[in-house]
Image (cartoon, helix red, strand yellow):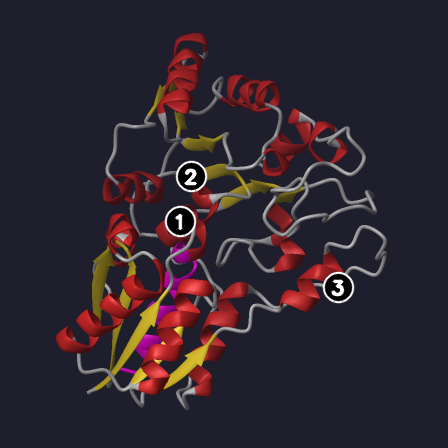
Amino acid sequence: MTQILAYRFSAFGDVAMTVPVITEFLNQNPQVQIIMVSRKNFQDLFEGIPNLIFKGVDLEDYKGIFGMWKLSKELQKEFQFDYVADLHDVIRAKILDRIFKLEGKKVFKINKGKNEKEKLTDIWNLDKVKLKPTTERYAEVFREMGFKVELSHQLKPKKIQKSGIGIAPFAQHQGKMLPIEKTFEVAKILSKNHKIYFFGGGKKEVEALNSWQLQIPNSENLAGKLTLNKELEKISELDLMISMDSANMHLASLAGTRCVSIWGSTHPFAGFLGYGQSEKDVVQIKDLTCRPCSVFGDKECYRGDWACLNEISAQQIINKI
């Protein structure tokens, strides 16, 4: 059996996007086994995938060049892999690539389309072009090895009774997050006809959502209460998830649940829409020529007024439902 060592160490959402690609690749290539190396707390994302071994690491144990050298030696001692798939292409991944090449391994890495994304996020560029989905960029790494993989780009809902709406109001950066009072308004309106479940993480988010639960009847705060595995299970049972352009959108994709996603300074054109999610379920202000100004939502607002988020109304979101 051919073994491929793959790695992606980055943010939760980026790693989550590798899951449907790896799953469909392995289904189409049953003679292949993948050893997926990532942060150890992401293990539940890869649970139950046939022919996949998850190798979780704590990056604090592998700092700098010598840390990556240590990791490379451990991986080569534990596994007998034929190919290396760099799904990250950042400094630590580049170091691993170099070491494995010196060891005679065949290394293939992702083309993240950096120049295309810089052009897309140039606020003076009025000719916005939809870029290749990130999932296809992952798949191309395996195609370059000589394997065939055709992505379905389809949600796979679980055949179970579904009910309730999940709401994940937070995001890592301001440029991705709807003003909190608007999401609260959406939750309050929807709670009249649907059971609402709140998702989040971190002490401040848990406290805020506990407050929402007290103020909004027919709602329940799940933030900080579930393991990742249980959270995926709960999301799979929902009729719908409402999320920012954040990790919960990608969790909804893995769980096979439709997601209405809210976009501010970022844009689905950059290739990060949840796998299998519909562009019809995207909520965004389309007539702002400065959008997108960022791939990750981590830049300050050029205009200074965050119009891309402040101009979104609660009714726009509710209309999608």
Q: Nearer the viewer, mark 2 or mark 3?
A: 3
What residue is shown with label 1? 12
Identify the mark nearer the N-term, 2 or 3.
3
Q: Is residue 189 above or below residue 170?
A: above
Q: Is residue 168 above or below residue 48?
A: above
Secondary structure, mark 3, is loop
Percent coordinates x, y for residue 245 in the rendering = 55, 44
Residue at coordinates 70% horizontally, 60% vertically from top-left? 118
What residue is shown with label 3? 129
**Three-letter amino acid code of the residue under disc 2:** Asp
- Contact (CB < 8 A) between labels 3 and 1? no
**Three-letter amino acid code of the residue under disc 1:** Phe
| Quarter holding residue 199 | top left
What residue is shown with label 2? 239
Secondary structure, mark 1, is helix
Query: Magenta residues, as a range?
Result: 15-30
Percent coordinates x, y for residue 140 in the rendering = 49, 78
Q: In the shown orientation, is residue 67 left or right of residue 217?
A: left
Q: Is residue 26 magenta?
A: yes
Percent coordinates x, y for residue 6 in the rendering = 33, 71
